[in-house]
Image (cartoon, helix red, strand yellow):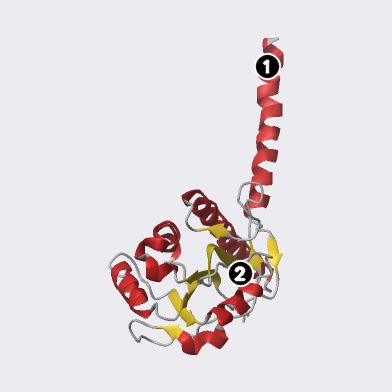
């Protein structure tokens, strides 16, 4: 009996462990694609609210990993409305060059936006935190391009933030755990945990693709005289 247990521990368990971690690597390297061709935000560039005029960086979703949120009047009513989003997500990923956050707010939110960014600037770089001051109709148009089937609230906002990849496709995981398969409720700390994991997956996916492309590139041999 002891010999059988030894054989199992030596041969079977390593194979089971390998299969477990191999499946984990596959899942880690691929985040489900939900919707393609999300509308870019470049058309709203003139409506972006800038606290401090710095070097101009075009407002676009293209070639960025972007969190898109629709705050409506929520920020005006409560400056702490985005606490989970800012402290659990933005602070963690703002150091990545290809990461950004774009938040739609209603007109009249400008002073609150300025106060929020000034306060958060004491903690981290807010240059990748972009605010678009839009009408409810404009916000609804962009929200509709996500093709989620969800409805916006009467104030032009929604409690979910959405993860859009560099090719303007909506991504989302944890369908078996989240309230819906499209976005992440930023008022719920547990869903911010799911979002944090999924951003890591998406970042790893792009890093892996870049590594594969570099390895596949033809090597230029040095000429020997």
Q: Which of 4 and 194 is in front in this view?
A: 194
Q: What element carries label 2?
A: loop
Judged left or right of residue 7, residue 183 is: left
Q: From the viewer's perspective, is the residue at label 2 or at label 1 nearer?
A: 2
Label 2 to label 1: alpha-carbon separation: 48 Å
* Label 1 sits on residue: 5
Query: Which residue is pictured at 54% across the width and 53% down the height?
Result: 197
User: What's the residue at 44%, 67% (across, down)?
Assistant: 74
Residue behind mark 2: 165
Tell whether 110 sits left or right of 17: left
Can residue 167 be seen?
A: no
- Measuring from the top left, give residue 179's x and y in whole percent: 61, 51
Q: Is residue 5 above or below residue 129?
A: above
Identify the residue at horizontal 50%, vertical 87% (top origin): 45
- Residue that lies at the very extreme toward the bottom in this rendered image: 46
Mark sitting on residue 208: none
Q: How crowded is mark 1: few (under 14 residues within 10 Å), some or many (20 or more)?
A: few
Q: Can residue 103 be seen in this view?
A: yes
- Residue 56, compared with residue 200, is above or below; it is below
Tell which residue pokes out farthest to the front in this image. 154
Counting other residues with Cα less than 10 Å from the Cα at mark 2, is it few (<14), some (14-19), or many (20 or more)? Answer: many
Question: For the C terminus, which image quadrant?
Answer: bottom right
What is the quadrant of the N terminus in the image? top right
Residue 157 is situated, as x and y percent measured from the top left of the image, at: 52, 69
From the viewer's side, name the closer residue of 8 and 28.
28
Q: Quadrant of residue 86?
A: bottom left
Q: What element carries label 1?
A: helix
Q: Do the residues labelled 2 and 1 touch (CB within 8 Å)?
A: no
Percent position of residue 54, x then y: 36, 85
Q: In the rendered image, which quarter is residue 80 located in? A: bottom left
């Amino acid at each position: 009996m002891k010999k059988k247990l030894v054989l199992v521990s030596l041969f079977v368990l390593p194979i089971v462990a390998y299969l477990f971690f191999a499946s984990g690597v596959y899942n880690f390297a691929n985040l489900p694609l939900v919707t393609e061709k999300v509308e870019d935000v470049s058309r709203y560039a003139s409506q972006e609210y800038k606290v401090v005029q710095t070097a101009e960086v075009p407002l676009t979703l293209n070639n960025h990993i972007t969190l898109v949120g629709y705050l409506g009047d929520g920020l005006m009513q409560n400056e702490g409305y985005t606490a989970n989003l800012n402290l659990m997500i933005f602070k963690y990923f703002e150091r990545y060059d290809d990461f950004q956050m774009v938040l739609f707010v209603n007109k009249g939110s400008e002073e609150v936006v300025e106060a929020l960014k000034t306060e958060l600037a004491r903690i981290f770089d807010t240059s990748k935190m972009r605010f678009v001051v839009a009408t409810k109709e404009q916000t609804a148009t962009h929200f509709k391009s996500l093709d989620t089937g969800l409805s916006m609230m009467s104030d032009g906002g929604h409690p979910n933030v959405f993860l859009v990849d560099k090719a303007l496709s909506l991504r989302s995981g944890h369908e078996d755990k989240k309230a819906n398969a499209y976005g992440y409720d930023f008022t719920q700390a547990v869903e911010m945990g799911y979002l944090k994991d999924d951003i890591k997956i998406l970042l790893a996916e792009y890093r892996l693709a870049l590594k594969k492309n570099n390895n596949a590139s033809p090597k230029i041999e040095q000429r020997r005289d």
